[in-house]
Amino acid sequence: MSVTPPRNAMTVDVEDWFQVQNYAGAIGRDSWEGRERRVEANTDRVLELLAAAGVTGTFFTLGWVAERHPALVRRIVAEGHELASHGHGHEQVFAIGPERFRQDLIRARGVLEDAAGVPVHGYRAPTFSLSPSRTAWAYGILAETGHLYSSSVFPGRHMGTGEAEPSPWHPCGGTVLEVPMTVLRAGGRALPVSGGGWFRMTPQAVFTAALRRVNRLGRRGVFYFHPWEIDPQQPRAPGMSWLQRRKHHTGLGSMAERLAGLLDGCQSFAWGRMDEVFAAEIGTAPLAALSKTT
Ligand SMILES: [Zn+2]
């Protein structure tokens, strides 16, 4: 008898190649406007990849990108994906403080909703820079600005949660659900099973075995990648260290193929949007908060 595996969330952080934190020292924010923009073409390729596999997911999109490519935002929604926010200017939460964080969220959500004509409920902090201990204030601001969930925490002591494998929870007893990235405890170590650079640098068989293990334990995974990761032809930024280059460029040439492999029906992983995979927890949050006050 076969057992249906839990569904994993497929997520895409929509930003351009020059906006990654790894490049922050080499590419000034004030030069973004003059850079070659590749995000629209790369995201269209992502849409094709997902459509070919019959998978829908969640696109955490920068307001900065939506301002310049509103038609792309509409295509994301038209293809059946969930539109969510990656903030506006790709600024780390702990670096900007509560007031600038509020402004960044409001601006991004406004631009995204205006472009797409659908409500935005989800948020992912740039570089997983939201920490339940260091920036706990962020959850109240997320709620205030109309967000229902966040997927912004990388588990591990350095990111503010001591637990290696936390389940989705409501930080500070508030209404916003935090869905952390997926980590698997194995052999005394915590292995990231979430995507990004780890996915590009881990042998595919090892990654899929780890994700399968997560699902066998009854847990739902959260996978993420960026459109620039399937673009080996992107410009090289001058002034990068060897390590920065390695971090950014390793595996870009085979990323599209690896993704197709992960999405392949023969792998028997089930994928969906964040608001579908975690619907039960997201849906009950406002009710739970209401019942507390009565
Ligand atoms: Zn990002």
Image (cartoon, grey):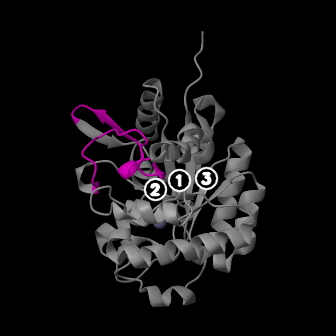
The residue depicted at 68 percent of the width and 59 percent of the height is 45
Q: Looking at the picture, which amino acid does disc 3 mark?
A: Thr
Give the residue at x 74% y 51%. 80
Ranked by sequence position, the earlier of labels 3 and 1 is 3
Locate residue 110: give its quadrant: bottom right
Which quadrant holds residue 14? bottom right
Type of amino acid at the residue the image marks with label 2: Gly
Q: Which sits in the foreground, 234 or 23?
A: 23
Does 81 sit left or right of 222 as displayed?
right
Which label was assigned to residue 24?
none
Magenta range? 159-188
Q: CA distance from mark 3 to mark 2?
A: 23 Å
- Label 2: how many residues lie within 10 Å, few (<14), some (14-19) or many (20+)? some
Where residue 42 appears, as percent x and y from the top left, is 63, 65
| Left or right position of 91 against 5 | left
Q: Residue furthest front?
A: 294
Measured along the vertical axis of the image, is residue 253 above or below residue 219?
below
Of circles 3 and 1, the one toward us is 3
Residue ranking furthest to the right: 78
| Residue 226 location (% of width, % of height) | 53, 60
Q: Can residue 186 be found in the magenta stretch?
A: yes
Q: Position of residue 154 (x, y in %)?
A: 36, 52
206 or 164, which lies in front?
Answer: 164
- Residue 267: within the magenta? no
Residue at the spot of label 3:
58
Residue at disc 1, secondary structure: helix
Q: Secondary structure at mark 2?
A: loop
- Label 1 CB, ligand 1: below 8 Å? no
Residue underneath mark 1: 255
Look at the magenta stretch and give its main secondary structure.
loop
Figure label count:
3
Structural distance between the alpha carbons of marks 2 and 1 = 6 Å
